[in-house]
């Protein structure tokens, strides 16, 4: 019985960073943070949304967790 790579509970956490356009960040966060809370719960990942940079058209989103939870969170955010 071999475990799949990335599903090892002892796997170290990593983080993934990407940009989300400002006009879509509201969809990601949801009403009073409901959507982002749901994504955090479903994926098990820690998601941090950066503050809007002066004059920037997008926001930094950092996802931290196991490779599987990061992939799931990224999928849920972009879906």
Image (tube, rainbow, N blue to C red):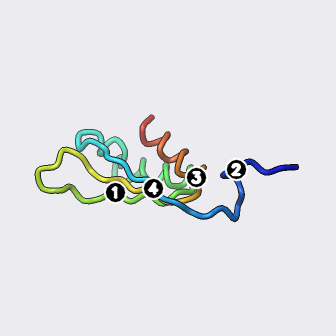
Residue 51 percent location from the top left of the image: 24, 59
Residue found at x 36% / y 53%: 61
Q: Earlier in the sequence, mark 4 or mark 2?
A: 2
Q: Which residue is mark 4?
A: 63
Tell me the tag on residue 5. Answer: 2
Residue at the disc numbered 1: 49
Q: CA distance from mark 1 to mark 4?
A: 9 Å
Seen in the image, is 61 located left or right of residue 8?
Answer: left
Badge 2 marks a residue whose secondary structure is loop
- The percent position of residue 63, horizontal first and vertical second, equals 45, 55
Report the disc number at residue 67: 3
Say whether disc 2 or disc 3 marks the residue closer to the N-terminus. Answer: 2
Q: Nearer the viewer, mark 2 or mark 1?
A: 2
Q: Earlier in the sequence, mark 3 or mark 1?
A: 1
Circles 2 and 1: CB distance less than 8 Å?
Answer: no
Q: Residues within 10 Å of mark 3 (few under 14, many from 20)?
A: many
Marks 4 and 2 in Cβ contact (< 8 Å): no
């Amino acid at each position: 019985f071999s475990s799949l790579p990335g599903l090892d509970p002892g796997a170290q956490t990593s983080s993934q960073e990407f940009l989300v356009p400002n006009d879509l960040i509201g969809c990601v966060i949801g009403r009073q943070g409901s959507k982002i809370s749901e994504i955090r719960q479903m994926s098990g990942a820690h998601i941090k949304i950066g503050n809007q940079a002066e004059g920037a058209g997008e926001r930094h989103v950092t996802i931290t967790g196991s490779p599987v939870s990061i992939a799931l969170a990224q999928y849920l955010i972009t879906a």
